[in-house]
Image (cartoon, helix red, strand yellow):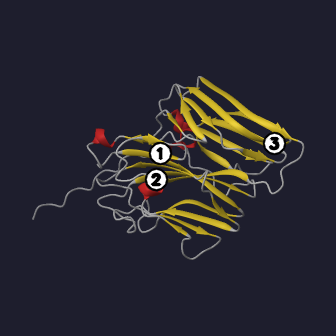
């Protein structure tokens, strides 16, 4: 079932979203999908599972505090990204799971304005699954055409092989550039950590919300990590297009690892000059849940 959480006519902006959920399914953070449609666009600008929107990693609640997104108390989801609209805004939630959501509480704050702002930039997300990461190709976090600025990244990893996942560089190609205008030194560095993070941590602009490496014995097969970075103080502007990619190979650049490449779920957040979505609809629930790939059979003894 889909429920309408907000249907607002006129010019204005959302300033705060609060949600808390009581559901029968232990995986409801992946099952429930948020959609936000601005100014009667044919496709929603925001379409992603509620858990990923609030950096809740592998479908598990984790309390953390940052500038635009925080999870406080017991399962209290808060978002402070400003979301402007010129004439109409609709927000819905869809339960894509097989069990009931017993209670979906929400409180959204918005303000109406006498006229639309000039040169409006609409809030967007791009949600992707890579199960597993593609061989020889970096992960696409965001690809869009138009004028705007990139403001945030959430990445969740399920490791199919031993070894650290965080060596891949971040690369921003702005306005059709053949070479990256911004190129980082590794994934853990892009998320403003170092040396395999070591533990969960949180700041207003970056952090690690889920990190079970110690329980799994280190950088081992089966670990799950969720990391976030908000570009609130350092947005990445573009006037024609943006391509943001993340390498994922064992050495970073090589885009492969043995025996198996890892699973990634990514979310890019940005503002742009049109309300329509910049990518196809997200996959069905069953295709959004990663599962460990079986290890290949060992080579027979000679």
Q: CA distance from mark 2 to mark 1?
A: 8 Å
* Residue 67 position in % (x across, y down): 59, 41
Image side of residue 208 versus residue 106, left or right: left
Which residue is label 2 attached to?
192
* Residue 41 position in % (x across, y down): 77, 51
Seen in the picture, residue 132 relative to 76 is either above or below; the reply is below
Image side of residue 262 versus residue 22, left or right: left
Seen in the picture, residue 244 relative to 277 is either above or below; the reply is below
* Residue 194 position in % (x across, y down): 38, 53
| Label annotation for residue 12 | 3
Sooner in the amino-acid sequence: mark 3 or mark 1:
3
The reply to whether the C-beta atoms of the residues labelled 3 and 2 are less than 8 Å apart is: no
The outermost residue toward the right is 114
The residue that appears at 89% across and 46% down in the rendered structure is 115
- Secondary element under disc 2, as helix, strand or loop, is loop
Viewer-closest of 136 and 253: 253
Which residue is label 1 attached to?
207
Q: Which quadrant of the figure has residue 6? A: top right
**Quadrant of the image for the C terminus?**
bottom left
Sooner in the amino-acid sequence: mark 2 or mark 1:
2
Viewer-closest of 36 and 148: 148
Q: Which quadrant of the figure has residue 260? A: bottom left
**Quadrant of the image for the N terminus?**
top right
Viewer-closest of 284 and 70: 70
């Amino acid at each position: 079932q889909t429920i309408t959480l907000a249907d607002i006519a006129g010019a204005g902006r959302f300033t705060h979203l609060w949600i808390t959920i009581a559901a029968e399914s232990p995986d409801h953070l992946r099952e429930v999908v948020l959609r936000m449609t601005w100014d009667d666009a044919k496709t929603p600008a925001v379409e992603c599972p509620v858990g990923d929107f609030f950096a809740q990693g592998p479908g598990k609640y984790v309390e953390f505090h940052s500038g635009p997104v925080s999870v406080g108390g017991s399962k209290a989801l808060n978002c402070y990204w400003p979301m402007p609209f010129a004439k109409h805004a609709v927000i819905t939630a869809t339960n894509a799971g097989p069990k009931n959501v017993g209670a979906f509480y929400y409180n959204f704050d918005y303000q109406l304005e006498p006229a639309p702002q000039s040169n409006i930039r609409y809030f967007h997300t791009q949600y992707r699954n890579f199960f597993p990461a593609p061989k020889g190709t970096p992960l696409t976090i965001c690809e869009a055409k138009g004028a705007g600025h990139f403001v945030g990244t959430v990445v969740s990893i399920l490791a199919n092989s031993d070894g650290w996942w965080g060596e891949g560089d971040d690369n921003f190609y702005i306005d059709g550039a053949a070479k990256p205008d911004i190129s980082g030194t590794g994934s853990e560095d892009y998320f403003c950590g170092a040396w395999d993070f070591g533990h969960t941590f949180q700041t207003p602009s970056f952090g690690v919300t889920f990190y079970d490496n110690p329980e799994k014995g280190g950088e081992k097969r089966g670990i799950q990590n969720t990391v976030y970075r908000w570009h609130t103080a350092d947005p990445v502007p573009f006037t024609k297009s943006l391509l943001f990619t993340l390498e994922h190979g064992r050495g970073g650049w090589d885009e492969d690892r043995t025996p198996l490449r890892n699973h990634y779920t990514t979310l890019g957040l940005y503002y742009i000059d049109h309300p329509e979505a910049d990518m196809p609809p997200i996959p069905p629930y069953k295709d959004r849940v990663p599962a460990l790939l079986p290890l290949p059979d060992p080579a027979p003894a000679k």
